Image (tube, helix red, strand yellow):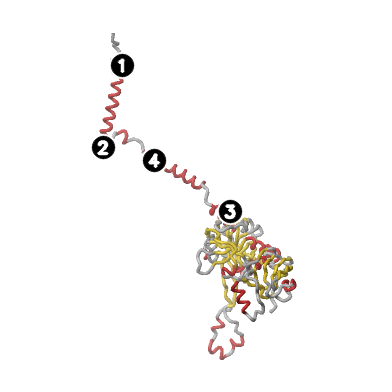
């Protein structure tokens, strides 16, 4: 027997399905024909919702960008930059020859020159600029000696805008290091690192004021270490760090940093016309010289009293063929002593002209620059063992260093 309600139970879902299908068909027709529902047209502003969402997304992106870690250069500069200063130095120099007053009053002289020479200024002011960095809360600043050479007035300008009158505590021309003191409250200071373990390829950052452009940052790598003064055309007792971080006039005295923002050198030299070649004084040398200047106002430098040249086949041949030299060299390598200063530590130790230095302070010696640097690293009164070869024999000598003389004997 059939259930009378069974047909009605199937009929209602079929009606709903038919209505849904009809709605889909009508909706598709409306889209195709371009007919829009009035209710949709009058509804709420979707573009405003989209704009609000975009603004929120932009704010989130901005906050993420601010919070994101910067690269090592930014972090190093933020750490050290405030303690890097600009140094303005000026000095007064004579601008005209100092003509005696009697000549100026002479009628014949005045007939030719009139009062022109009287009216011309006798002096002029020369100005220069460089960089430096503050090493302690006392306001001691390391810079280059050539930045403040002969300066009558020194002004130190901080990154925060403060201008402080500086005092030159002392300078050392042989290493091109000077110390200025600028007294003020709340001075920022740098962190000093080490150049001892540097290798070519290590990161390097230079901060300074090149060409008057304050707080300029350049970066690169350590290109070489142990560059001798003769290799770069300067006469200094320094073993230089070479870098390709851009260094220009005005960078002098500024710091060379490692990737941690620690000072590893003092920027000092560029080769005229070269690109990608800058040179820095190792921070250990700068610290040693600065310490003496701060404590004593001058540098006490060890001295042994010899002139020398690196020995090779060419030098050996020239010496042996020169009758004026008066000796014959049998060694092919080492450092040849060409002069021993009278009454010098070397003379008192028994060093003679024509000796070939094979060992110095326990190190095998191949170049004259090695000996110079080893002496530079010593203090007055140190005793140094030296092996020399003379007439086929090896002699072991001991030299006690003395204070570098103000004037050498002829």
Q: Secondary structure at mark 2?
A: loop
Q: Left or right? Give the position of 283 relative to 213.
A: right
Disc nearest the viewer among 2 and 3: 3
Q: Secondary structure at mark 4?
A: helix
Disc nearest the viewer among 4 and 3: 3
Q: Nearer the viewer, residue 52 or 381?
A: 381
User: Is disc 4 surrounded by few (<14), some (14 to 19) or many (20+) residues within 10 Å?
Assistant: few
Disc nearest the viewer among 1 and 4: 1
The CA span between labels 4 and 2 is: 24 Å
Disc nearest the viewer among 3 and 1: 3
The CA span between labels 2 and 3 is: 66 Å
Measuring from the top left, give residue 120's x and y in whole percent.
55, 80
Choose the circle earlier in sequence order: 1 or 4: 1
Q: Do the residues under discs 4 and 2 have CB atoms within 8 angstroms?
A: no
Choose the circle earlier in sequence order: 2 or 3: 2
Choose the circle earlier in sequence order: 4 or 3: 4
Choose the circle earlier in sequence order: 4 or 2: 2
Q: Which of the 4 quarters of the picture holds residue 352? A: bottom right
Q: Mark 4 — residue? A: 50
- The residue under the point 57% across, 72% down is 126
Query: Could you tell me which quadrant the N terminus lies in?
Result: top left
Choose the circle earlier in sequence order: 2 or 1: 1
Marking on residue 9: 1
Q: Nearer the viewer, residue 48 or 394?
A: 394
Whether residue 187 is visible to the viewer of this picture, yes or no, is: no
Measuring from the top left, give residue 103's x and y in whole percent.
59, 87
The CA span between labels 2 and 1 is: 39 Å
Q: Nearer the viewer, residue 410 or 245?
A: 410
Q: Mark 3 — residue? A: 260
The CA span between labels 3 and 1 is: 82 Å
Q: Mark 2 — residue? A: 34
């Amino acid at each position: 027997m059939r259930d009378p309600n069974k047909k009605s139970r199937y009929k209602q879902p079929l009606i709903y399905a038919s209505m849904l299908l009809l709605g889909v068909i009508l909706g598709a027709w409306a889209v195709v024909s371009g007919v829009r529902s009035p209710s949709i047209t009058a509804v709420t502003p979707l573009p405003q919702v989209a704009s609000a969402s975009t603004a929120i997304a932009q704010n989130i992106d901005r906050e993420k960008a601010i919070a994101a870690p910067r690269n090592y250069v930014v972090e190093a500069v933020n750490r050290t930059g405030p303690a890097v200063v600009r140094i303005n130095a000026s000095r007064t120099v004579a601008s005209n020859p100092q003509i005696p007053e009697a000549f100026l009053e002479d009628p014949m002289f005045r007939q030719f020159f009139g009062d022109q020479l009287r009216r011309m200024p006798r002096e002029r002011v020369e100005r220069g600029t460089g960089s430096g960095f503050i090493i302690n809360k006392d306001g001691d600043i390391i810079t280059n000696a050539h930045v403040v050479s002969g300066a009558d007035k020194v002004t130190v300008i901080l990154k925060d805008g403060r201008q402080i009158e500086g005092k030159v505590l002392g300078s050392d021309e042989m290493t091109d290091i000077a110390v200025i003191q600028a007294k003020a409250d709340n001075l920022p200071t740098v962190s000093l690192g080490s150049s001892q373990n540097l290798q070519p390829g290590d990161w390097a950052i230079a901060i300074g004021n090149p060409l008057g452009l304050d707080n300029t940052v350049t970066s690169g790598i350590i290109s070489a270490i142990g560059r001798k003064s003769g290799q770069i055309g300067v006469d200094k007792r320094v073993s230089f760090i070479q870098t390709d971080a851009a260094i220009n006039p005005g960078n002098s005295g500024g710091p060379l940093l490692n990737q941690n923002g620690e000072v590893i050198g003092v920027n000092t030299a560029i080769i005229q016309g070269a690109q990608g070649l800058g040179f820095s004084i190792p921070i250990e040398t700068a610290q040693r010289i600065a310490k003496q200047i701060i404590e004593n106002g001058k540098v006490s430098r060890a001295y042994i009293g010899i002139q020398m040249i690196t020995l090779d086949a060419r030098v050996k041949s020239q010496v042996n063929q020169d009758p004026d030299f008066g000796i014959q060299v049998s060694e092919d390598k080492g450092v040849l002593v060409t002069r021993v200063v009278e009454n010098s530590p070397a003379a008192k130790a028994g060093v003679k002209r024509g000796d070939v230095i094979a060992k110095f302070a326990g190190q095998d010696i191949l170049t004259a620059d090695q000996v110079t640097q080893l002496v530079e690293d010593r203090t007055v009164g140190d005793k140094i063992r030296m092996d020399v070869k003379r007439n086929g024999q090896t002699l072991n000598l001991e030299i006690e260093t003395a204070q570098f003389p103000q004037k050498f004997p002829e």
